[in-house]
Image (cartoon, grey):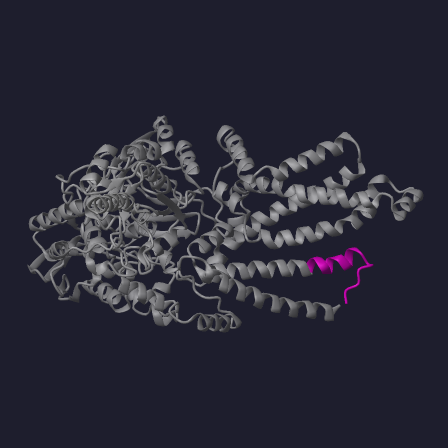
Amino acid sequence: MRKYIVRRLVQMIIGLFLVASVTFLMFRLLPGDPTASLLDPAFTVEIRETIIERFGLNEPLHIQYINYLQNLVQGDFGRSFYYRRPSVEVLGDKIWNTLILMLSSMIIAYSIGVIGGMILSWKRGSKIEWGGITLGLFLRSAPMFWTGMLLIMLFAFNLGWLPHSGMRTPGYEAATTFAKFFSVDFLRHLLLPMITASLYFLGTPLLIMRNTMLETHGEDYIELSRAKGLSEWRIMILHAGRNALLPVITAGALFLGQALGGQVVVEYVFGWPGLGREIVLSAQRHDYPVAQTAFLFLAFMVMLMNLVADLFYSYLDPRVKLK
Amino acid sequence: MRAYSFTAVLVLSLLLMLSMHTWAFDPEDRVKDVMILSTTPDYDPVRYESAMITADVWRELGMDVTVRPLDFHRLIADTRDEPYDFDAFTLGWSGRIERLDPDMFLYSLFHSSQAMPGGNNRYGFMHDEYDRLVEQQRTEMDIDARQQLVYEAQDILAEEIPKLTLFFRDEIQAYNHENFEGFLVMPGEGINNEWTPMKIEPLGDQRMLRIASTEDLDTLNPLAATTVWDWKNLRLIYDKLVRISPEIEPLPWAAESWEITDDVVIDVTLRPDMKFHDGYPVRTEDVSFTFNYMMEWGVPYFDAFLGPLESVEAVDESVIRFTLKEPYAPFLTNTLGQIPILPEHIWENVVEDYDLDHPEQWDNPTAIGSGPFAFNYWRRGEELRMDTFEDYFEPASIDGILHIVYGHAEAVLGALEMNQADMNAWRFEPLHIAEVERMDHMTVTEAPDIGFYYLGFNLRRPPFSDKAFREAISYAVDYELIIEALLQGYGQAGAAGMVIAPGNEFWNNPDLPRQFLDVDEARYRLEEAGYRWDDDGYMYYPE
């Protein structure tokens, strides 16, 4: 087991090195150069050159690359061209906002999805199944900006129950960091974007769960449980459900890795200051350090969540042996 | 024999005439592959559609036109750098307040020294007389004489037409008149100018001015700030020696007065008894420190304003002496009017204390200045709060300002409608104007923009290297349709070569010729210049 984890970690480091190299090249191959966004268009030629030098962009590509890797190994992810601040801080400012929105949406989507999927498969052939699948597919294909706007129209503008934008009421002063994220005011702001995102995310766990559950129906151990006289609910959740959970775990882990990069659409519709927009902007601005750090972070999260999912597998299904 | 040679001559001359005819419409001579570069429609539909509308008219004239939408940064780079592979492009200049001074639009955009890779003379416009005029207006300290030079420079641009201005937008904004009164409207700035928060009066319980914006600021550090959003806020936290009055005149502000002893020595007297937000007094040394510090480290944004300075020194407790390398006309409005006063006691050791390569890298988390509003907090992506500085020499009536960031223009509109914001930070989308006009608690304001959207030409290669061609083409642009269709009518038509907006009343030359869409006029002028058309209507260069 320990050997397995070490091996995976080594693989991860190699993987991250590759990602770092590829993103380094990728952004530099993009048409247009960072100076276009870095510089005010009114700047003269001389200023432009000074700035290019200040950021080391005058060096040949391979030197820039070596510098980048050297700094990376020392934990220096570079300074944003645009903000002039360390890229880690630029992303760090927004990461909590994204983390809270994405984790809460995911927990809701996956709890409802998993249980819903179990019920759908158990009610195979019924109207409940038909309705559930249609609803799942409908929510999965409804674009988030559309559901988001509908919710805003209804709950924020027509009923006036919930705020339509932002994370906190303008001028809200939190006494502590804890209160910044766990006040009633914050939760009221969180509600609509969270519902929008979880409705969209719901379809995947719901349908995967249903499909894998169907395969367990004829299995011997289900028959055995029935023969033992266990209740249907108990069989469904503890026996069939546990075995059908594996693909959902993989999907969920991969999803979480990506979701931490933020969801640009939700952030846009609800004015949520998250990572997604920051990453899109950094690519648009050719702000290499921020964009590279963001991609590296996402790659790391996906790899890490993969590892977590694999470890979880062996716990859920004792037949899976990690070597 | 004679008959034979006669026939031969006849046949030969017939052949010659035939070949003349076909030679006359040599495919090589067609006006073809004319390329207009533009932004992608999703980046800016107005610029893209302007190019499309124009291309249609040009096709009607028999030109073969392609519109190529590019990523914005690519567009900037491609029009600025070799190989200059384009014939025309649509871009815009925003109307920032320092651009009220004509120097930037006249000198930086059209002087021949800027026509090199990376320069802003994207047109390749070279004109000796023009160069002389814009150099002169830069050093002319007498404002009326300078106005004359600026007028003449505009005349040359209108005659040479390196670009066509498509339109000047109207800045439509709105404020809640139940909460506040006394808003000031300025050209280019609208109501979100530096005077509004200083002058408005609260009418009820709402004493914080809530400004709804779709954009956040990027930094609190005046040495790193470059966007309009940075400066609209930082200029309230940091004071300036001179501020541009609502009537667009330089007004002594943190300076009590100035005295121009000769054209290159200016003595500025500091207003007494001013304080920074942390209680330290504002000294003449702080002022001289600010300018010297910025010159020493280099601040690209202020480069043009700091460049003409030779030295800055605090003469005594009340006077600061600025010495210029040569006379610099925008000195009062731009150098003194834009550069914020920094507290020396905070900035002098920043680089050492925080181990930085350049002071622009500092976060400046508490942003201590001496302006009318003191920084309270900034939650990135959410809001900035500034509170009225009670020790200011003219403290504002309101309690403070909240600059609130919304995700998109609809949310801003919603916030205004639901009384969650008192004004918007930037102009409305044209489609939202009718909606805000229906709101009883809102007053809609209108200001002319001093920036503009334009169609630039590449004067380095045909067809736009030909002045007569450019003249004719100035009648082949549908100015009205662009304003009606793309701006819902909220804009003023531009003109050939116009760069100083009519809203910039003092500097705009009111006698410039105006053009309008007239395809026949364009065709007539092209014909006069020797352009030809074949039977299929394709246009050819003069023989």
Above or below — where is A245 with respect to B290?
above
Outermost right residue: A227
Quarter occupied by residue B203: top left
Residue at the spot x=59%, y=61% of the render? A300
> Residue B341's spot in the image, x, y percent?
24, 59
Q: Is residue B363 rendered to the left or right of residue B321?
A: right
Please state the extent of the stretch shown in magenta in the rendering.
A308-323
Q: Nearer the viewer, residue B430 or B181?
A: B430
Q: Nearer the viewer, residue B395 or B124?
A: B124
Q: Nearer the viewer, residue B310 or A187?
A: B310
Q: Is residue A184 rendered to the left or right of residue A217?
A: left
In reply to whether residue A67 is colored magenta, the answer given is no
Q: Is residue B146 rendered to the left or right of residue B96?
A: left
Quarter occupied by residue A305: bottom right
Residue at the spot x=71%, y=32% of the render? A131
Q: Is residue A210 rendered to the left or right of residue B467?
A: right
On the question of residue B320 being in view, the answer is yes
> Residue A130's spot in the image, x, y percent?
74, 32
